[in-house]
């Protein structure tokens, strides 16, 4: 099974509605649109006061599978976070708290001990034990299964049962990202016996799930909807809704109309072109929160024209990021020169990283400087090929913006359109990337740590698409990974950010907040990206 990346946001027919849905480079925000400064970001919507029989929720695509090993994108995680749980949990404020493990203890730099909650029941009625946790984590280490979260286990030497309700994870080297990953799908626990019995059917419409969350998997009508039913044996707070029905609505216009008419009660990742209508509607309310998401141009090939760093820097200087962001998210996006949003630097004293981050390239376009770099590199007239796809206007418009930038500085930029499946393959198959220099992608973090982005450029890392290799970069990345103190790690990561920018390893374009629309019948959903890894639907109920 191919391994996609966290950047697979632009890889599905409806992902455009999720990621950008940009209206065009250089466009102004429409009248009545809310710019970044006008948005009020919150961690959650008003808490629910009462129970509700059930509610409906729109998804832009059907989850291909619900096995946590392959839960690496919005549709899967939005559903699975309510059915299966991890050792730790992401809060609406994007911090960590105990999940199925009531306590996590670091006994030395390479040893983590997780004490499980007693009396937790699976949906089948069986009781959670350490055997289940060991089996669940060890599945990521099985190369035959091809876990999409294998990078989070790169330093795991062993996962062992050290008590009836205790597991111990031994690392080969200190790894500050590993304990954070135990709050996302990498730390999910399911019943060992069920996974063994179901084999490849686990997490599919033909199989099922056996987890511990506040909802259990109900009827899955492929191509139409999926239902979750409240699990009354849940160890935590009882869900306010008796059931949740996820409707698969890939067409953004149909999804918006369903929200406006009340056919569905809510949705995350509201289509940006629909925001003004939803903001003005009296059928519900639109909210915004932290998404830890950036829009970028991935460098796919460090040979050819882009082998010279001056050409990569020139493209970054020539791209009209400010104009592009005005059209993105209907004015809610912000142009950026950083590959991570500012919220990820929390816990790091600003004065300790400000000099490094201030040295990142400016957002403002500088065509004169870009042309000088092209001339210095002797690249005038050289060809650059950027991938595009008909899966949504965002991909095509970003590719077109690159073509415009290249034309203005003397490069011959070809936009090559590939089918949606071919575009998806760019994130997982090196062969598919051959012949391309750049491709658009959107990246969200699954932990609140900038290192999780900058570690991608380490030699051999799966999401190191261009195959960049630098002993100096690797050494600094390893040093940052081994540093458990957030402030010290942040300083080291800021150094990586500077190196990545100097080398133009990836071209940042914009950042934008998350969005959620709730109809009048419900409230209580989070507004941040925490919904990907925490049982958000349990908090949704009557206003």
Image: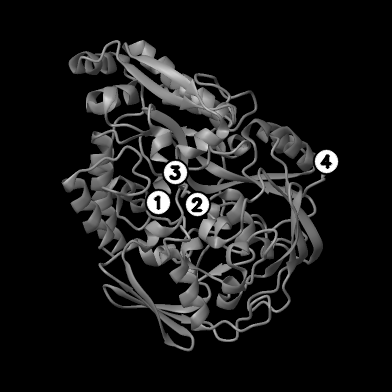
Find out whether the residues at labels 4 and 3 contact each other: C-beta distance under 8 Å: no
Find out whether the residues at labels 4 and 2 contact each other: C-beta distance under 8 Å: no
Sequence-first disc among 4 and 2: 2
Q: Nearer the viewer, mark 4 or mark 3?
A: 3
8 versus 352 height, above or below? above
Q: Position of residue 33 (x, y in %)?
A: 62, 29
Sequence-first disc among 4 and 1: 4
Q: Dot 1 surroundings within 10 Å: few (below 14), some, or many (20 or more)?
A: some
Q: Which residue is mark 4?
A: 261
Q: Which mark is residue 287?
A: none
Q: Dot 2 surroundings within 10 Å: few (below 14), some, or many (20 or more)?
A: few
Q: Dot 4 surroundings within 10 Å: few (below 14), some, or many (20 or more)?
A: few
How much space separates mark 4 and mark 3, taking CA atoms?
39 Å
How much space separates mark 4 and mark 2, taking CA atoms?
40 Å
Find out whether the residues at labels 1 and 3 contact each other: C-beta distance under 8 Å: no
Q: Which residue is mark 1?
A: 344
Q: Can you tell which quarter of the image residue 283 is in?
A: top right
How much space separates mark 2 and mark 1, taking CA atoms?
31 Å
Q: Which residue is mark 3?
A: 428
Question: Nearest the camera: 27 or 14?
Answer: 14
């Amino acid at each position: 099974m191919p391994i996609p990346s966290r950047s697979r946001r632009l890889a599905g027919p409806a992902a455009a509605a999720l990621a950008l849905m940009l209206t065009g480079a250089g466009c102004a925000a429409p009248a009545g649109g809310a710019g970044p400064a006008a948005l009020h970001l919150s961690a959650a919507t008003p808490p629910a006061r009462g129970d509700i029989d059930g509610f409906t929720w729109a998804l832009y695509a059907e989850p291909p599978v619900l096995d946590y090993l392959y839960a690496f994108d919005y549709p899967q995680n939005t559903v699975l976070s309510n059915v299966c749980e991890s050792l730790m949990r992401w809060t609406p404020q994007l911090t960590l708290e105990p999940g199925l493990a009531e306590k996590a203890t670091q006994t030395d730099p390479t040893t983590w001990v997780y004490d499980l909650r007693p009396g937790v029941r699976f949906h089948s009625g069986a009781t959670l034990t350490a055997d289940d946790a060991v089996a669940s984590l060890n599945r990521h280490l099985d190369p035959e299964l091809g876990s999409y979260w294998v990078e989070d286990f790169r330093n795991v030497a062993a996962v062992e049962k050290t008590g009836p309700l205790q597991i111990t994870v031994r690392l080969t080297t200190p790894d500050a990202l590993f304990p954070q990953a135990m709050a996302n799908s990498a730390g999910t626990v399911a019943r060992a016996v069920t996974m063994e019995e179901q084999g490849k059917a686990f997490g599919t419409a033909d199989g099922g799930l056996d987890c511990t969350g506040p909802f259990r998997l109900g009827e899955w009508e492929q191509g139409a909807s999926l239902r979750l039913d409240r699990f009354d044996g849940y160890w935590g707070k009882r869900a306010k809704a008796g059931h949740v029905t996820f409707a698969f609505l890939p067409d953004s216009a149909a999804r918006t109309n369903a929200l406006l008419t009340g056919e569905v009660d809510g949705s995350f990742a509201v289509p940006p072109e629909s925001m003004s209508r939803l903001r003005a509607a009296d059928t519900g309310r639109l909210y915004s929160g932290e998404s830890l998401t950036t829009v970028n141009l991935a460098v796919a090939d460090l040979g050819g024209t882009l082998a010279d760093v001056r050409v990569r820097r020139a493209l970054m200087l020539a791209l009209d990021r400010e104009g592009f962001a005005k059209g993105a998210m209907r004015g809610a996006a912000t142009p950026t020169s950083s590959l991570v949003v500012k919220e990820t630097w929390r816990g790091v004293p600003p004065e300790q990283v400000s000099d490094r981050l201030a040295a990142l390239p400016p957002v403002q376009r500088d065509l004169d400087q870009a042309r000088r770099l092209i001339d210095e590199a002797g690249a005038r007239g050289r060809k650059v090929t950027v991938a595009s796809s008909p899966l949504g206007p965002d991909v095509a418009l970003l590719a077109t913006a690159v073509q415009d930038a290249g034309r203005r500085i003397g490069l011959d930029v070809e936009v090559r359109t590939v089918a949606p499946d071919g575009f998806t393959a760019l994130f997982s198959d090196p062969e598919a990337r051959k012949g391309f220099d750049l491709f658009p992608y959107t990246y969200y973090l699954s932990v609140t740590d900038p290192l999780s982005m900058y570690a991608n450029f380490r030699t051999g890392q799966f999401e190191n698409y261009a195959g960049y290799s630098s002993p100096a970069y690797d050494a600094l990345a390893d040093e940052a990974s081994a540093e458990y103190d957030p402030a010290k790690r942040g300083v080291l990561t800021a150094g990586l950010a500077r190196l990545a920018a100097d080398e133009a390893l990836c071209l940042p374009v914009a950042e934008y907040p998350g969005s959620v629309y709730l109809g009048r019948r419900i409230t209580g959903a989070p507004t941040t990206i925490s919904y990907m890894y925490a049982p958000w639907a349990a908090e949704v109920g009557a206003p």
